[in-house]
Image (tube, rainbow, N blue to C red):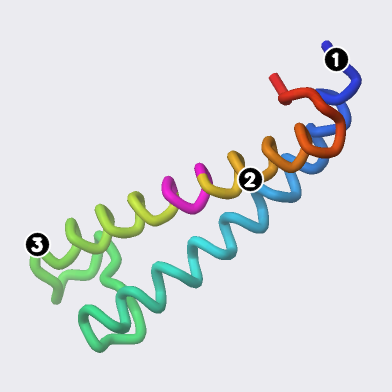
Amino acid sequence: MKASALAYKPASLALGAASGMLAAAAFKKTWQLLRHEDEAPKATDEQRHWNEVLLAAALQGALFALVKAAVDRGGATALRHLTGTWPT
């Protein structure tokens, strides 16, 4: 394994944690804008309809994947600029 890849592992873990927090905040804000509610429905919330629960889950999954991909790609690009190698 390349030294740059080893050096990237701790940064990748930190970026992963940061991206999770960023994605959670983005989802909360998006849900508030779309539904004018502070909290998204939980899957076990008996008072919510299937379409609400599934919409919330799909939106949350899409936002988490989008933020994670953007942060991972940005971190890899930054490493390449710093070291000249792409993490593998």
* Outermost residue to the top: 1
65 and 55: which one is in front?
65
Residue 13: x and y, percent?
Answer: 73, 42
58 and 42: which one is in front?
58
Q: Earlier in the sequence, mark 3 or mark 1?
A: 1
Residue 33: x and y, percent?
Answer: 28, 83
**Rendered position, 61 above or below 38:** above
Residue holding disc 3:
51
Crowd rating for badge 1 (residues with CA inside 10 Å; few <14, some 14–19, many 20+): few
**Rendered position, 50 above or below 31:** above
Left or right, 26 with respect to 31, comes to right
Residue holding disc 1:
2
Identify the secondary structure beneath mark 2: helix
**Rendered position, 55 above or below 85:** below
* Quadrant in the rendering for residue 49: bottom left
Q: Amino acid at mark 3?
A: Asn
Q: CA distance from mark 3 to mark 1?
A: 47 Å
